[in-house]
């Protein structure tokens, strides 16, 4: 393991059981092929900055083993006390290590997937590019960094998928029951976008159009909120927004759009 100082700062560390279930469901769904196709031995998946409790790493391991039984999940934390506290929960296929965005793994291993949730939210926007570059540089070929944010109970979640070529998609995921307006998810945008939700920025235009489509689909509410959301997403796609998923994901309250359509405007 690297003896260099871990890259990053200690986060608040708050977490809850099942908080990251929406992203886990996406990793075990649309991203399952990435895991199954990996042929250079057991794939390694990192839960980066898992916080004061290692519960999200345990849940990630359990969920991904259904897709790829030999997956190796490593929880990485920058706080030595958190790593020490997690060690009794280590088991075959699940381990814990000290580190940060440099993603230190023994033997020079390269992770196929790094999930970093509610980590960069506490950093300045200017730190995002370097953090992405550091982590993506450690990935295995065709690897993926997932930079996300969610609320305390995981009812609202967003994440950006970053590959070697750069960010490729933004995914938004809602608990549909009780949803008033889709744009309420704006407060949980990843750090790269949360300060860009202002007029003149693409992500602001996307969320505004999402709300308008939701309003136009109000008549579908008689058939349930899921039908209303399906109609909303279909309306967005018909309007030319580059959605990269379809009804099977929309039914879950999940919507993915090509990152280029919402990326920060050049200044």
Image: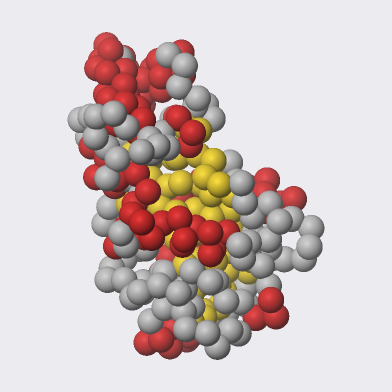
Q: Nearer the viewer, residue 32 or 187?
A: 187
x, y percent for residue 259: 48, 36
Quadrant the N terminus occupies = bottom right
x, y percent for residue 37: 74, 50
x, y percent for residue 152: 26, 57
> Quadrant of residue 125 in the image?
bottom left
Query: Is 255 situated left or right of 93 in this image?
Result: left
Query: Which residue sits at x=27%, y=25%?
Result: 208
Query: Is 135 situated left or right of 51 in this image?
Result: right
Query: Is 43 situated left or right of 189 in this image?
Result: right
Query: Which residue sits at x=27%, y=71%?
Result: 12
On screen, 248 above or below 19? above
Query: Which residue sits at x=45%, y=55%?
Result: 129
Q: Nearer the viewer, residue 267 or 245?
A: 267
Quadrant the C terminus occupies = top left
> Quadrant of residue 73 in the image?
bottom right
């Amino acid at each position: 393991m690297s003896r260099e100082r871990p890259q990053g700062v200690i986060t608040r560390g708050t977490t809850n059981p099942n908080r990251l279930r929406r992203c886990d469901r996406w990793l075990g769904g649309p991203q399952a092929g990435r895991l199954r196709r990996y042929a250079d031995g057991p794939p390694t998946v990192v839960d980066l900055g898992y916080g004061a409790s290692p519960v999200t790493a345990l849940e990630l391991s359990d969920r991904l083993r259904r897709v790829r039984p030999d997956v190796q999940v490593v929880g990485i934390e920058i706080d030595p006390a958190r790593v020490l506290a997690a060690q009794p929960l280590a088991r075959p296929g699940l381990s814990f290590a000290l580190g940060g965005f440099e993603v230190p793994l023994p033997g020079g291993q390269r992770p196929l997937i790094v999930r970093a949730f509610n980590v960069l939210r506490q950093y300045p926007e200017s730190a995002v590019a370097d953090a992405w570059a550091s982590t993506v540089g450690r990935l295995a070929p065709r690897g993926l960094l997932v930079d996300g944010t969610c609320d305390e109970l995981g009812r609202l979640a967003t994440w950006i998928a970053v590959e070697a070529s750069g960010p490729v998609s933004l995914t938004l995921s809602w608990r549909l029951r009780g949803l008033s307006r889709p744009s309420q998810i704006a407060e949980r945008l990843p750090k790269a976008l949360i300060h860009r939700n202002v007029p003149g920025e693409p992500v602001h235009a996307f969320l505004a159009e999402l709300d308008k489509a939701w309003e136009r689909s109000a008549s579908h509410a008689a058939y349930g909120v899921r039908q209303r959301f399906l109609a909303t997403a279909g309306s967005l796609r018909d309007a030319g927004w580059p959605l990269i998923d379809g009804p099977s994901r929309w039914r879950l309250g999940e919507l993915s759009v090509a990152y280029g359509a919402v990326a920060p405007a050049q200044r």
